[in-house]
Image (cartoon, helix red, strand yellow):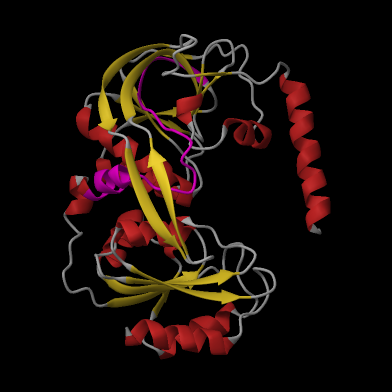
C-alpha cells in the first residue's frame, strides 16, 4: 500500500472512531491558572525541577535545545485510566494533559477515545499503573516515573493491562509485585501519578537516573571495562532492510554478537547492554537500551534518510556515549550498500 493510500485509510478509521465515540475533544490541566482542574488531586511532591538540555542533531549538524517543565507527583481522585498508554481522563471525558508527552491534538487524532459510562471501579487504596506502550516509548517515557512511584510508595497496588507485553511481564517479575489486571478502562479512586509535559522526542535525564538506580538494575550496571560488541537484529520486526542478513554477517565477521533483543528476558537484556562497549543495529526502539550502557560506549545507528528519529542520539548525549550514524538512501526496506556498513564498522572500531 502506498503512503497516500495508507494515510487515507488511517484517516478514515480515526474519523469513524471519533464519530462513534461522540463528543468533541476537551482537556484539563493540573497546573493552569485560568481554569481549575476538573480532576481532584493531592500534590505529594516534586519529581523533577524545570531544566534545559541540548543535543547535537546529526541530521542537520545543529545544536538543538529543549526545556523540561517541572514535574510533580500527585494522587488523583476518581480518575478514568486507559491502561495501555496510561492516558488519564476526568469523569466527563476530558483528557488530562499531563498524562501524555504528545501534543494533545496529535494524540487525539491518533487515538480518539472518549471515555463514557465507565462503571468498573478500582478502590484498593493507593495504586500505580504500569503502562504497556510500545517498547521504546515505554522505556523512554514511562518507566522512569513508574520506578519512582514503586520505590517511594511500596505499599501501593500495581495495575497493569491484561494484554501487557512480555517486557512489562518481565519487569513485574523483576520487582516481584502482585498486580491487578485490567481488561480495559477503569475508574480509579486513588491513582499515584507523575505528571508529564509535551516532551516527545526527548528523554528526561531524571527518568534515566530513576531507571538506572532501581536496585535490581543498579546491581548489574556500572561496568568500567565493557567488552561486548552487539548487533541488534530487526529481521523479525518491521523496518528491516532487505539485506539485513548480509549486514548481520558483516558485523559477525568484525566480532559482533547478533542478538534479537526482543527474545531476551528483560533483565538479561539489561545485563548484556551493561557489558557492551559497541552497540549497533538498524534504527529503532532497541537503541533506547543505550541508557543501560556505560559512559564512553558507542552506538552505531543504521538509519534510512526518510526515517531518522532523534531519541537515540539524544540519549547517547545524556549518557556521554559516542554516536555514529550510517545513513542509507531509499526506503527503510531497501537494501543498504554494504560498503557503507564496512566503513561504519571501521570508524566505530578505530575511534
Q: In screen coordinates, is 233 left or right of 1?
A: left
Front residue of 331 and 50: 50
Q: Which residues are magenta?
A: 186-212
Please provide percent x and percent y for residue 33: 44, 13
Please provide percent x and percent y for residue 15: 78, 31
Question: What residue sits 53% from the left and 65% below the top?
Answer: 60
Q: How many marks?
A: 0
State which quarter of the image contains the C terminus: bottom left
Locate residue 3: give its quadrant: bottom right
Front residue of 232 and 175: 232
Asked whether residue 125 is in view, the answer is no
Question: What residue sits 28% from the left and 63% below the top?
Answer: 320
Question: What residue sits 45% from the left and 11% below the top?
Answer: 39
Locate residue 222: give its quadrant: bottom left
Q: In screen coordinates, is 317 left or right of 27?
A: left
Q: Is residue 285 above or below residue 249?
A: above
Asked whether residue 119 is in view, the answer is yes
Q: In screen coordinates, is 205 left or right of 216?
A: right
Q: Is residue 84 above or below residue 223?
A: above
Please provide percent x and percent y for residue 196: 41, 32
State which quarter of the image contains the N terminus: bottom right
Front residue of 50 and 37: 50
Task: State yes or no: residue 206 in magenta.
Answer: yes
Task: State yes or no: residue 90 in magenta.
Answer: no
Please provide percent x and percent y for residue 300: 43, 74
Amino acid at each position: 500500500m502506498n503512503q497516500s493510500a495508507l494515510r487515507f485509510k488511517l484517516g478514515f478509521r480515526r474519523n469513524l472512531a471519533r464519530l462513534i465515540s461522540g463528543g468533541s475533544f476537551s482537556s484539563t490541566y493540573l497546573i493552569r491558572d485560568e481554569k481549575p482542574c476538573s480532576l481532584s488531586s493531592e500534590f505529594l511532591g516534586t519529581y523533577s525541577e524545570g531544566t534545559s538540555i541540548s543535543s547535537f542533531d546529526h541530521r542537520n549538524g545543529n545544536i538543538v535545545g529543549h526545556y523540561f517543565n517541572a514535574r510533580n507527583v500527585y494522587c488523583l481522585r476518581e480518575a478514568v485510566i486507559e491502561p495501555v498508554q496510561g492516558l488519564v481522563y476526568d469523569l466527563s471525558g476530558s483528557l488530562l494533559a499531563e498524562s501524555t508527552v504528545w501534543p494533545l491534538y496529535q494524540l487525539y487524532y491518533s487515538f480518539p477515545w472518549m471515555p463514557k459510562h465507565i462503571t468498573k471501579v478500582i478502590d484498593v487504596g493507593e495504586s500505580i499503573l504500569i503502562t504497556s506502550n510500545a517498547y521504546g516509548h515505554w522505556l523512554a517515557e514511562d518507566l522512569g516515573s513508574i520506578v519512582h512511584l514503586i520505590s517511594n510508595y511500596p505499599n501501593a497496588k500495581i495495575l497493569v493491562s491484561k494484554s501487557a507485553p512480555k517486557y512489562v511481564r518481565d519487569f513485574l517479575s523483576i520487582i516481584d509485585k502482585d498486580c491487578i489486571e485490567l481488561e480495559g478502562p477503569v475508574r480509579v479512586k486513588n491513582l499515584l501519578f507523575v505528571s508529564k509535559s509535551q516532551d516527545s522526542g526527548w528523554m528526561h535525564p531524571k527518568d534515566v537516573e530513576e531507571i538506572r538506580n532501581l536496585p535490581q538494575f543498579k546491581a548489574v550496571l556500572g561496568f568500567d571495562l565493557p567488552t561486548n560488541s552487539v548487533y541488534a537484529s530487526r529481521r523479525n520486526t518491521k523496518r528491516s532492510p532487505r539485506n539485513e542478513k548480509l549486514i548481520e554477517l558483516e558485523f559477525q565477521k568484525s566480532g559482533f554478537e547478533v542478538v534479537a533483543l526482543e527474545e531476551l528476558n528483560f533483565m538479561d537484556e539489561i545485563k548484556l547492554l551493561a557489558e557492551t562497549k559497541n552497540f549497533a543495529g538498524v534504527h529503532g526502539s532497541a537503541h533506547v537500551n543505550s541508557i543501560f550502557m556505560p559512559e564512553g560506549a558507542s552506538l552505531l545507528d543504521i538509519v534510512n534518510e526518510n526515517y531518522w528519529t532523534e531519541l537515540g542520539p539524544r540519549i547517547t548525549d545524556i549518557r556521554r556515549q559516542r554516536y555514529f550514524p550510517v545513513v542509507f538512501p531509499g526506503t527503510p526496506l531497501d537494501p543498504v550498500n554494504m560498503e557503507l556498513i564496512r566503513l561504519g564498522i571501521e570508524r566505530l572500531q578505530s575511534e
